[in-house]
Image: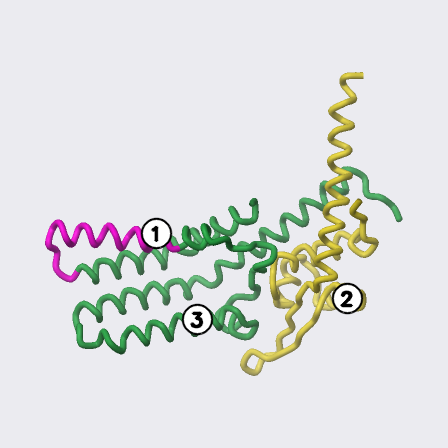
Chain colours: A yellow, B green
Amino acid sequence: MAELDQLLLDPTRLAIVALLAAADWAEFGFVRDSVKLSDSALSKQVTTLSKNDYVEVRKGYVGKRPRTWLNLTNTGRQTLAGHISALQAIAENARSDGAEQPRR
Amino acid sequence: MNEPTPEEAAAALRSVHEGKERVINSAAGSRWLWIVSGLVIFLYCAVNALFPATQVWLIWVLVAFTVALTLALRTRVGSALLGRPVTVSSRSLPLSFSWRLLRMAPVLGIGIVVALVVLLLHVPYGQIYYGALAGLYIATIGPRFQLWLLRRQGKD
């Protein structure tokens, strides 16, 4: 059975990882604006995620401007898939319990 | 570990879905890229029709443009230069053969319709009409069609 992941129980971290799951690479600015965090708050979350090998960070330049790109690692993808399955199981169980109750 | 309540689980699943939607919405990229692509197609067809002698080398210009654009969109720096802050994951939204074919279908359809009209009505410079229609399609409907395709793939 799929297991919930402790790190992804935090809604902000889940939002970041879910966003990155649909992307190959995403710019730091895009993730920051999408999850509505400040630079420093996103930086902290990304550090936590990259320490756990969920997110890979690449830095580079576009012209003279420095850019940072984020990528979900295979570990991150697998963990997210398991976490989503576990969430679906919880939601599904609640639905089936709710459907059974009126019959009692 | 505290297990989330069913409401929290549903909210988390909604957040996962919203993340996917945000990436898909940004995948259409910047509008000007579609407009430039439409213009290139129109110019290629118009120059081809008006100056047939250029056909030999003009195709290579088009091929070079297409290859450069495709490669740029596959790299982080290239995508950023072209105004795309994110590249859609081929793992989470795999493009099957039928979807790839469907993406080409409108441009091929326009080609068939224009070719039929040109043949039946003996219209001169059919290529220019094709270029104008295909270019207009790419510049205006192209991004919306791309979004529709990605959303459909996301549901599969």
Region in magenta = B104-125
Q: Chain of mark 2?
A: A
Quadrant of residue A68 within the rendered picture: bottom right
What residue is drawn where x is 48% and y is 72%? B71
* Mark 2 to mark 3 CA distance (whole Å): 32 Å
Horizontal and vertical percent for residue B43? 27, 68
| Residue extending farthest top | A104
Label 3 Cα crowd, 10 Å radius (few <14 / some 14-19 / many 20+): some
Q: Chain of mark 1?
A: B
Label 2 Cα crowd, 10 Å radius (few <14 / some 14-19 / many 20+): some
Quadrant of residue A65 within the rendered picture: bottom right
Q: Chain of mark 3?
A: B
Decide if residue A83 is on the left or right side of residue B40: right
Judged by its main secondary structure, the magenta piece is: helix
Q: Foreground: B151 or A38?
A: B151
Q: Amino acid at mark 2?
A: Asp
Q: Which mark is residue A5?
A: none
Q: Amino acid at mark 1?
A: Pro
**Dot 2 and dot 3 within a common chain:** no
CB-based contact (under 8 Å), mark 2 and mark 3: no
Mark 3, residue position: B69
| Residue extending farthest front | B97
Mark 2, residue position: A53
* Mark 1 to mark 2 CA distance (whole Å): 43 Å
Q: Which mark is residue B106?
A: 1
